[in-house]
Amino acid sequence: MLVLLVVLVLQPAPAAFAEDTSDITWSVRPANQSGPDGRSWVELALDPGDQATDYIAVKNFSDQTVAFKTDAADGYFTDAGRFDMLPPGEPSTGAGTWITVQDTVTVEPTATAIVPFVVRVPENAEPGDHAAGVAVSIRSEILDEDGARIGMESRVGFRVMTRVTGTIDPAVELVVLDAQYSLSWNPFSPGRASITFEARNSGNARLLLRGTVDAAARSTSFPGESEPEQELLPGESRTLTVTVEQAWPLFLITGEIDLTPAVIALDGLAVGMDPTVEPILIWAIPWPQLMVCGGVLLLILGLVWSRTQSRRKTAKLVSLAREEGRRAALHNEGDA
């Protein structure tokens, strides 16, 4: 997978800076000594103390000769699931220091140059997966409104994954950070539950995060169909939020996060691990439904009260009528 990085830095412009790079385009791919070999990135399996030589194919699509800068740095996965490498100026401390590559490469117009690089694994390297990247960049400069020089570096590269042989011990930790329920104020529509959790790769193998969140008798898989796959390097953490739609408020919603990561082998296959399960508990007070029920109850009580009052009034009128009748009868008897 190609990586494009653009870094803006304020600094004096070295002589190697190009005045205009708008017409310069290039690609960077893994290669053998003859040219690109169809790989998207490099994956190696090496013993501690061993080394391997691999190659970069730099294709210059422009109509001018270009002197590119080449470098290597530690790699990581972003929160969006994309592979990236440390920016220039930020020192590497891991697998980026294992890679040796020439500083520059000059490529003729529309030509391809093959650049070797060497990966040397230290004797004391820990077993497991170690990520780095190699990149080919070009620098240019522009002047801002105040006349200050702004240096811009554009980089294109790919990942270099090295698995140091030894005991591979995959492990993952799961922590629930937040669980909330969002009501629908339409009492006849369900709401949704949002669960935020952190997954941490506490082992030494690269993992592919997969799983489900079960809540309110519904199950939601992560990542979703339209979401990128989530890879996690050893020591990395990823915070994910999963939304369970069509969840009815039942005062207390119970469920669980079922994390089923897979270990990514060097051949690209994903080997499943035992699931890690964490319970979730969400208060979901059905206020709209309670308001409707309260309104219905008040209406019923009002009807009962009105009917009771009506009956009392009718009974009183009947009683008064009877009393009036008795008085009339007594008056008539007195006249007789």
Image (cartoon, rainbow, N blue to C red):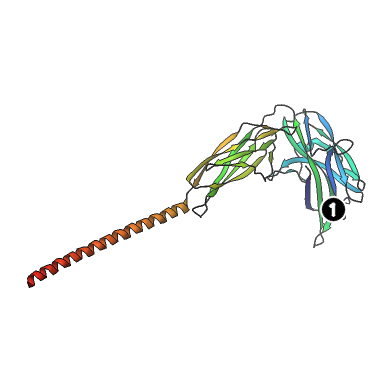
Image: 315 above or below 82:
below
**Is disc 1 placed on a helix, strand or loop?**
strand
- x, y percentage for residue 113? 90, 42
- Residue 110 at x, y = what percent? 91, 47
Residue type of the residue flagged with mark 1: Ser
> In the image shown, does 125 or 259 lie closer to the viewer?
259
Q: Is residue 30 left or right of residue 212?
A: right
Residue 211: name its quadrant.
top right
Q: Is residue 249 above or below residue 202?
A: below
- Report the quarter where the C terminus lies: bottom left
Picture mark count: 1
Q: Quadrant of the N terminus?
A: top right
Residue 275 shows in the view: yes
- Image position, residue 20 (x, y; %): 87, 55
332 or 245, which lies in front? 332
Work out whether 334 lies above or below 258. Answer: below
Residue 39, picture quadrant: top right
Q: Which residue is mark 1?
A: 140
Point 86% across, 43% down: residue: 58
